[in-house]
Amino acid sequence: MTAHIGRALCGAIAAGFFLSLADGGGAVLAQETGGGLILLPDDDGLTPLVQDDPPTLNADRIDPARRSIDTATENATLDWVSPLRLTNMQIPVTGRNARISGERQVVGFDLYVSAPDTHRQLQLATQSSIDLLPERSSMRVHVNGQDIGVARLGNFDGYAADFLDIPDGVLRVGRNQVQIEFRQGHRIFCGPEASFGLWTDIDLAQSGLSVNHADAVADADGFMMAFAAQVASGHSAEIRGLDKLGPQAAEWRRHLVRGFNQALLGSPVVFRFSDYWTLAQQDRALARITVLPASSGRVSYQIGGDGAHVMVLEIGPDTRPEDILTMAQLAPQPAASRAPLIQPEQDVPLSAFGVQTESFSQRYARRDHPFRLPDDWLVLTAAKARLNFDYIYATGLPRESMLLISMNDEAIRLLPLRDEGGQHISQFPIDFEARILQPGTNRLTFELMVPGDPPDLPCPAADHAFLQISDTSTLHVPYSPSMAIPDMDLAFGALTPDSIRLNEMSGRAYSDADIVTLSAALDRSQAEIRAATLHLISLDDLGSVPSAHHRADRRLLEDSVLSIPAAGDAVTDPALASNDDPFQRRRQQGSGFSIGVSRAISNGWGVITGTVIWVKDRIFPNSGEQLNQWLAARHGQAILFHLDPARPDEIWMLRSPDSDIHAIAHAIAAARISGAGPRGQVSILSHQGAWQNWVAPDRRPILLEPWSLRNFRHAMGNLVSARPIFFTLMILFLALLSAVIALRLVISTRDTKT
């Protein structure tokens, strides 16, 4: 009873208080739920806090000026840049910055546009080396083949934007091609050495067309603009709700990743997969894909609440991925074709390589031209290949000017550029050993070096070419029987997204997103029509790598991806390490005949044992020991293994735990186009993005066709050249054995006659 009265009293007091605020005059009755009435006293001294008529939200209460300011601020924060997408895979990229080095270089980009009439300026955010001379450093821009202007290079303190006006009618809806010719001059010096100090970094994420959020249009072209901007600086593109498709999710993931990567040239696109409801990311998303299960297939475009362009894919039970990609207007761009294939025993012109007549107008230039030989071509003998060279160089070049011609990074000829300037030199023969060439991908390199005259002053402004190489130059490769030798390049060139294989331990080193990224990298270029496999392994699974007779030290393999050599390591030179050794000083004080004799014996024994080991390694090469010595001096972010000759189409890949999968994917995609990729039996991707290869010294070639009179000499020459000392000693042994038998025969015959 007491509790009931207390509750009634509290309720009455609260009700009376709120009613008194609602009506300032007269007594107010508060009714409690139990039915009792309590008379509240009238208080004329209270000023009502709430008016009789409650306020309503209408247009009179909105401040138009304040609202316009807020809207403008919000739109300004949502504005973004449709970026230049780098299509040249050989340009080094760090994060969102691409570095262009040297005196002159032409770089290609893609630019996506949805409404050409709304864009009037192209912005380029750059930062240059302090060594650049602004008066002689510039970038000339062409859009869809039309010159739109020149901007001077001179941003030394940080990134700054230059703006170029775009004439009407130059841009078109969709993909636009942009070419920028960089010209960079040194402010103090002139010559090949000076050109290495010339560079300009371009911010890919802030170079392109400025897009006003208020002008955003939800359509296919607007989405592609935003999607290119999303992935411009290495950020991942988000696909939401893919797991809602159930068992079909894996197939759709593969098709979507492949479709978007085929639609965008350049570096592989990185994806991440999430649910519909996710936490807000630190960086605002510009584009994403949302997958919705539906009764039928449909593609629509929306602008999300965060300003992102959203491609909505409604997928029905019978919807095919090809139909959705067609609806989404993801037109695949031509895949980067592999290096052109040339045939032996023919004079193949450089034009067949895809090389046009080249002009060199810089003091230092290096240009690589990849090509391929048949996979069953092999020459290990002293047979010669020939390059018939057509070229002309300018008159008055410094006497130290030269052209270095290399094949697979091995110099084959150094041509001085003097005494015959201005004369067309035709079919100049350059013979080189054919064993420098390899089955599969090869690279012909031209490297020009023209010293400054004088070298301690800026180079004079000149547009004339120092050297021209005609595309009528020809390459002749000698005959080879159908033979094969274990090499990683053949399997590496045949990899496709379907080549990736996982085991139960792969998840310790590779996430689902990592596997998708690698698949995208393998889809950037055309592959050989053959079966190949890429096994992804973790550190715990190194024992599963078949090594055949190679005996690699597991600790060295782990250290090559786990540790990075630091500067200031312990000194290993005995002469330096013993300076503070008191025992060494004491030993140096001793002298005499006995010490000299023991030292001479020790040195002599060391020479003998070293010679024996050298001969043994040549006769019976110990590839395991040589591999361990090679591994001990190298570190990288990924290793590829191809050790078992019985499995020629399989590669095993191990990555560093702290490696960037995007950098690895970029290096793989670039290597499959340029030809400067993995070779031999073990290849390490360094932290600088270069491939370092180890070739086993005891590789044995195999004849793939029946023996015949035509191929006997060439095939036997390859077999002997693979292990020359072994076969030489074998022939010597047979000769000695024959001599012993002949001597025995002579002696026995003479005894019989006697």
Image: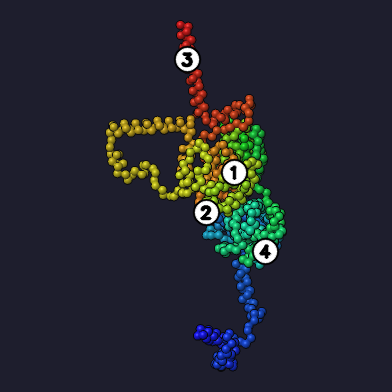
- Which image quadrant for residue 137? bottom right
Answer yes or no: do the residues labelled 4 and 1 have beta carbons within 8 Å? no
Q: CA distance from mark 1 to mark 3?
A: 58 Å
The residue depicted at 57 percent of the width and 90 percent of the height is 37
Of pointers 2 and 4, the one earlier in the residue sequence: 2
Front in this rendered view, residue 458 or 528: 528
Q: Which residue is farthest front?
A: 1
Mark linked to residue 302: 4
Residue carrying label 1:
533
User: Which residue in the protein does label 2 denote?
Assistant: 131
Mark 2 or mark 1: name the one nearer the start of the chain: 2
Residue 296, percent across and down?
71, 58
Residue 177 place in picture, x, y as percent: 67, 54
Q: Residue at x 63, y 25 (%)?
A: 709
Q: Can the viewer see residue 605?
A: yes
Tag 1 and tag 3, C-beta contact below 8 Å: no
